[in-house]
Amino acid sequence: MDMLSGEQITAAALTDWRKLGQGLHARFVIRDFRAGVRFLSAIGEAGEAAGHHPEVRMGTGYVDVKLLSDDAIYRDDGGTEHQVEWVTQQDVDLARRISEIAAEQSISADPRSIITIELALDTANAAALAPVWAALLTGGTEAQGRGTIGDDVRDATRRVPILWFQETDPHPTPRQRFHIDVQLPYDVAEQRIADAVAAGAVIVDDGRAPGTTVIADPDGNKACVGTFQPATAREQQPASA
């Protein structure tokens, strides 16, 4: 199934959900454990009916749900098809159904609380480094390039965050090589950055904001704050954003 474009995801108007990284994410607020189990059971039935299964995690007071397809089709400029992890129409359809279930069970969504973390390693030698980190983080090299056209290390069981490699020119060591990618909902990122700055961070680079903003702590350790910005939200941004 074809991967969806950003415009198509925006047009789906999934108010309970936010696209972070490769997938759709939602957090639903539950009253107690029993309510959470009942909600998860209904989600399971919906997934079975659709032949597509979400990732779910339940904790005290919440159920987190992630939807993505591991067989999405990406076509490069030459027309070659690649199988990748991304959002497809089946994810959008199941997201709608899960939101319907939540409404039926009087469960509300809390999309502003969603967050995902990725690790990024700056290197000019990704192909040589990736097998090492795949073996260390996942116990094998199969995770290298799984679900992507690059060398990202992506554990099939989601035990660890994605590790991706940011291409750089060759450079001597030492220099900062790792940084954290913080993926946030589009309607949260600006305030989260402001909170970090108020706590002592500085903005290093906002030239690609609101999509990506680089901040640093007082010791210079950097983090990239990324967000998928829906077209409607972009249109509402001031010219200086």
Image: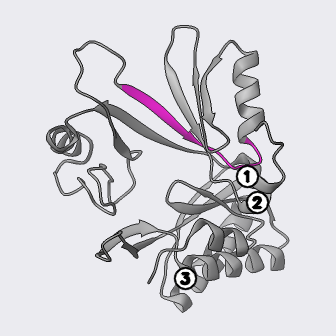
Q: Which mark sits nearer the N-terminus, 3 or 2?
A: 2
Q: Position of residue 118 (x, y in %)?
A: 46, 42
Mark 1, other Cα within 10 Å: few <14 / some 14–19 / many ≥20:
few
User: Which amino acid does the dot numbered 1 rest on?
Assistant: Gly
Q: Mark 1 points at which residue?
A: 61
What whole-number distance in Å separates the C-alpha atoms at marks 2 and 1? 5 Å
The residue nearer to you, when weighing 164 against 140, is 164
Q: Is mark 3 on a helix, strand or loop?
A: helix
Mark 3, other Cα within 10 Å: few <14 / some 14–19 / many ≥20:
some
Q: Is mark 2 on a helix, strand or loop?
A: loop
Furthest-bottom residue in this view? 49
Furthest-top residue in this view? 219
Q: Is residue 172 left or right of residue 44?
A: left
Q: Which residue is drawn at 16% across and 52% down?
A: 141
Q: Which mark sits nearer the N-terminus, 2 or 1?
A: 2
Tell me the quarter of the image containing the N terminus: bottom left
What whole-number distance in Å separates the C-alpha atoms at marks 3 and 1? 28 Å
Q: Which of marks 3 and 1 is in front?
A: 3
Q: Which mark sits nearer the N-terminus, 3 or 1?
A: 1
Q: Name the residue under label 2.
A: 30
Examine the structure image and report whether residue 181 is included in the region drawn in magenta: yes
Q: Which of marks 3 and 2 is in front?
A: 3
Does residue 150 appear in the picture of this structure?
A: yes
Q: Which residue is drawn at 74% across and 55% down?
A: 111
Q: Mark 3 points at which residue?
A: 90
Quarter-wise, where is residue 63 in the image?
bottom right
The residue nearer to you, when weighing 164 against 67, is 164
Examine the structure image and report whether residue 187 is included in the region drawn in magenta: yes
Quarter-wise, where is residue 156 in the image?
bottom left
Give, as a single range, the part of the protein colored magenta: 178-188
Q: Residue at x 19, y 57 (%)?
A: 142
Does residue 110 appear in the picture of this structure?
A: no
